[in-house]
């Protein structure tokens, strides 16, 4: 990532993320763009306004609005996390400070009829097929694709695309899930029948 400093500062300058309120006040001719790694290697300090997770949220509000429109989702910053709600699910993005990367969590159960504040409460699991990343864009795009596919599966998994390797893998997983769910439904049906008529179990021989 690149950061911005003022080349007028005599001592160690403070570096800013692009879009920071204070970065915008540095005159055009005095601005210098350097890599964050270089700034850190020179012992420069991060601006308190635009550094870290909160700083990213503060400086990227316009982009977040455009993601909401492009991907048809809604983004909330709460409890030190980003919550993303779609028609199909609820997601949590957590910034892990020590590695400087985002981790994606998926809500176990989502009720879209609830108010946003209530809908985000409850248990989440780590979305294992998504590696920790520095890119919020990548996570937004993943969430959108995931939930679009989920909507297709709820209709019929056979309608999922099978062009790329990743799509083929996802298709197989959806097929297996549909199979497991069919087996569970039959098991449940049999256990219901047998509980109503215990004699039926003795008739079962396979
Ligand atoms: Zn700043």
Image (cartoon, rainbow, N blue to C red):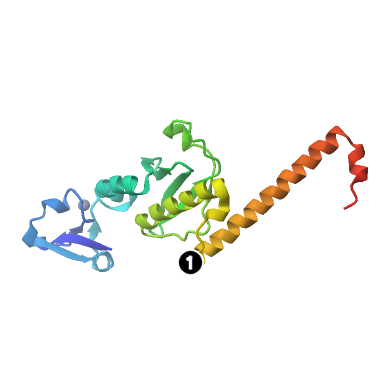
Q: Residue at x 57, y 49 (%)?
A: 156
User: In the image, is the residue at mark 1 within 8 Å of ligand 1 by its beta carbon?
Assistant: no
Eyeballing the image, is 33 above or below 185?
Answer: below
Nearer to us in this view, 137 or 2: 137
Asked whether residue 54 appears in the rendered view, the answer is no
Task: Give the quadrant of residue 11.
Answer: bottom left
Label 1: state its secondary structure.
loop
Q: Is residue 170 left or right of residue 80?
A: right
Nearer to us in this view, 206 or 83: 206
Label 1 crowd (10 A; few <14 / some 14-19 / many >=20): few
Q: Pick the quarter of the image with the N terminus.
A: bottom left
Eyeballing the image, is 126 above or below 30?
Answer: above
Asked whether residue 80 appears in the rendered view, the answer is yes
Nearer to us in this view, 37 or 90: 90
Q: State the residue position of label 1.
A: 164
Image spot of residue 192 (x, y percent): 79, 36
Image spot of residue 144 (x, y percent): 42, 51
Task: Give the quadrant of residue 188.
Answer: top right
Q: Is residue 157 left or right of residue 89?
A: right
């Amino acid at each position: 990532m690149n950061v911005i400093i003022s080349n007028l500062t005599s001592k160690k300058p403070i570096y800013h993320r692009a879009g920071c309120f204070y970065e915008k006040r540095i005159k055009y001719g005095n601005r210098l763009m350097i890599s964050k790694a270089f700034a850190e290697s020179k012992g420069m300090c991060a601006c308190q306004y635009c550094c870290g997770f909160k700083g990213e949220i503060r400086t990227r509000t316009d982009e977040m609005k455009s993601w909401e429109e492009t991907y048809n989702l809604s983004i909330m910053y709460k409890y030190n996390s980003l919550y993303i709600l779609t028609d199909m699910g609820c997601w949590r993005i957590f910034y892990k400070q020590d590695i400087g990367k985002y981790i994606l969590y998926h809500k176990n159960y989502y009720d879209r009829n609830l108010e946003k504040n209530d809908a985000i409460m409850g248990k989440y699991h780590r979305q294992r097929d998504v590696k920790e990343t520095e890119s919020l864009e990548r996570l937004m795009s993943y969430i959108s694709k995931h939930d679009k596919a989920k909507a297709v599966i709820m209709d019929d998994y056979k309608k999922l695309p099978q062009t790329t390797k990743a799509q083929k893998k996802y298709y197989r997983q959806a097929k297996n899930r549909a199979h497991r769910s069919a087996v569970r439904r039959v098991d449940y049906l049999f256990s219901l029948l047998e509980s109503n008529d215990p004699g039926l179990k003795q008739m079962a021989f396979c």
